[in-house]
Amino acid sequence: MNESAPHPAALPPAVLLAACTESRSRRSGPGGQHRNKVETAVILRHPPTGLGAEGSERRSQAENRAVALGRLRLKLAVGLRSAPLPGPTTPPSALWQGRVRAGRITVATAHFDFATLLAEALDSLAAAGWEPRDAAPRLAVSPTQLVRLVAREPAALALVNRQRGDLGLGPLH
């Protein structure tokens, strides 16, 4: 990934959507006749990474697009690592600093910022050899807070544990 470009999970929705291909289809299930007759399901594909996501559980195409975009942002956060950070003394992003209060990360998983913060946490963990106690000081949180953030997205925790396993380290819980 380009070092000067922001992580794709951090891009504004319009910019990320512009970088994606979008297709629509019909899906069966609850939602009545409207859902079965109209192409409300939205499938987004991010060609630069090959990652994609779908939203089909809502009745409205716009709502399904928003759901698909949120899912794509999480997949990008988990599946794509940024270039290693310059060093352990480099401060975290302004967004990260604004979300840490008294050593605690405050963000709901449904909030737009969650994927961006998760990407930064995973990038920091990757740069620290997947060791929370080495990544946490740079992010101004405890290792426990860092692991709790990652554990809120099951795919992220699975990634960290897979990487740790490859290094002969035990899993995080």
Image: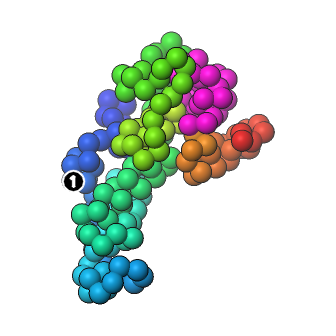
Residue drawn at 42 percent across, 21 percent down: 97
What is the crowding at mark 1: few (fewer than 14 residues within 10 Å), some, or many (at least 20)?
Answer: few
Measured as percent of width and height from the top left, residue 101 is found at 48, 20
Measured as percent of width and height from the top left, residue 52 is found at 40, 61
Q: State the residue position of label 1.
A: 18
Dominant SS in magenta: helix
Residue drawn at 62 percent across, 22 percent down: 142
Residue drawn at 52 percent across, 21 percent down: 139
Type of the residue with mark 1: Ala
Q: Nearer the viewer, residue 35 or 119?
A: 35
Which quadrant holds the N terminus? Answer: top left
Placement of 30 over or under 131, stated as above or below: below
Q: Is residue 124 left or right of residue 48?
A: right
Measured as percent of width and height from the top left, residue 172 is found at 71, 39
Measured as percent of width and height from the top left, residue 71 is found at 41, 56
Q: Nearer the viewer, residue 23 or 64?
A: 64
Q: What's the magenta region? A: 124-149
Is 135 magenta? The answer is yes
Quadrant position of residue 7: top left
Q: Can residue 87 be spotted in the picture? A: no
Is 122 magenta? The answer is no
Quadrant position of residue 36: bottom left
Q: Nearer the viewer, residue 35 or 155?
A: 35
